[in-house]
Image: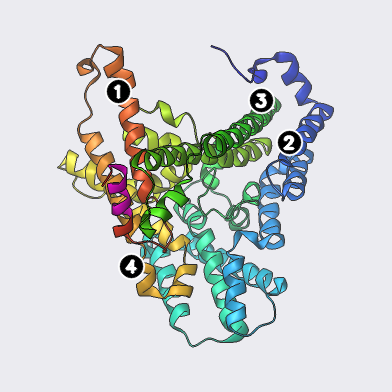
Amino acid sequence: MIRLIPSLEQSPRLVAGCKRPAGQWALLTVFALLLTLFSSQWPAIAAFLALTTAFPRHRRRVVSVCGIVLALALPGWLDLPFLGRLAAQEGLAHLPEFLIRLVIAAVFLLLAGLAALAFRFPRRLVARRPVMAAVLSFCALLAAVSMAPLTGWGRVAAWTAVLAIGRMLWFFCYTLTDRDSRDRDSVPLQAGLWRPAWMASTSSGTPIAKGAAYLRRIEAHSADELAVTQIKGLKLLIWALLLKVVYVWFGYVTYRKLGIPEFAAAFGSSVAGHPFRWYWNCLSLVAAFLSSLLEMSIWGHQIVACARMAGFRALRNTYRPLASRTLAEFWNRFYYYFKELLVDMFFYPTYLRYFKKHPRLRMATATMMAACAGNAIFHFLRDVSFIGELGWWRAIGGFQTYLFYTFVLGAGISISQLRAKRKDDQPHCWLRRHLVPVLCVSGFYCFLHIFDDTGRTYGLHEHFVFVGRLFGF
């Protein structure tokens, strides 16, 4: 098998060299130089990685402190454009960063206090149902802030707190689920993982590398493990760079040379009543689907690469999704850590409690709870700024397209699991056993990409109209 990037971590000489201080700093220097091609926040992330390299015995403390410091210093992970518009509505001249940082610090202290209470009273209802308690509490806070008669700086500060908690919510849920671990980290160590330092360049609310319990399992404890992990981190960042080059050339050839319309343009023309030909619509959908695969890979690889450079053997977020033979496998390969979040927070709690005497119903219910309900809850609470701008009813009504997406996704995965065949029942023909399942799975997700819309601009009707355009209607 031809490898574009050789297995450098299998070279004893290279591993031995990277175990020495000079080798570690050389590796970090190359990594930091490559990181400049991905993130404008590379100096802060490079400084964090330098501290983990300089103080490997205190790695967890460095991760915690740097996570909090970078969350305060780089508040771009919040929806700052929304806060700016909110400040303008209140007649405020500008959006002061000191207020944003002050509110973020208050949110860290609030969540730390709640985590300490959950650890102190692990048998109370809130601690036994942490996800439900956290989600309902956040919804109550969101309702209170959206309906409270706040004005001026008070309204801006309240919405800043809501946005900060919304971005930290699922990281915090991992802390709550860690309450029964014998070797659990203290609250200060947990707090730094509510916005990990390796996610300083993104506003995503998906916990990459999950929570403290997972990090304890994947931390490199020996010099050999650390060297191999950091070499793999550098390889992954190089692979992300290659994919970025492919992404740029793919867009250039597809949209500039071949003249295929971008999906947003094709969809907008359909809504306006001047659709492209059906084959252009199909090509724009396929191109958008392939572009989304490349974008997710590049985005996830750079974050996981930083986690590996920090000394954690994190798995890739995206790994060969087009090789998937089942719908569930694609979901796992495309966005691994989001899938893990939904499994940990929704699938297992449902699977372990309900329909124990009905295996198929039990599996289907747990799958729908994760892929449908959990998926919708995550994205609705992630984009709470729509509630501040549109109000509750319009924000909920505009969410109908993504609700349909989650329902079809959950139903498709459930049916795929129920129809799974045993290995001895698989066809012997290579095409039917390998190629046909891969094409069917990719085609399903490509078609479903039409409804993967968390915005509130177009309704479900416009998306179904575009589906008709694909078939020439």
Give the SS element for disc 2. helix
> Which residue was labeled with disc 1?
436
What is the crowding at mark 4: few (fewer than 14 residues within 10 Å), some, or many (at least 20)? few
Q: Is residue 334 left or right of residue 401?
A: right
Q: Earlier in the sequence, mark 1 or mark 3?
A: 3
Q: Position of residue 76 (x, y in %)?
A: 64, 60
- The disc label shown at residue 34, or none: 2
Give the magenta part as a residue range. 463-471
* Kind of residue sitting beneath label 4: Gly
Distance between mark 4 and mark 2 Cα atoms = 43 Å
What is the crowding at mark 3: few (fewer than 14 residues within 10 Å), some, or many (at least 20)? many
Give the SS element for disc 3. helix
* Kind of residue sitting beneath label 1: Val
Distance between mark 1 and mark 3 Cα atoms = 37 Å
Q: In front: mark 1 or mark 3?
A: 1
Vertical side of 165 occupied by 232: above or below? above
- The disc label shown at residue 397, or none: 4
Q: In front: mark 4 or mark 2?
A: 4
What is the crowding at mark 1: few (fewer than 14 residues within 10 Å), some, or many (at least 20)? few
Give the SS element for disc 4. helix
> Which residue was labeled with disc 3?
228
The front one of 407 and 98 is 407
- The disc label shown at residue 145, or none: none
Q: Position of residue 291 (x, y in %)?
A: 50, 39
Q: In front: mark 3 or mark 2?
A: 2
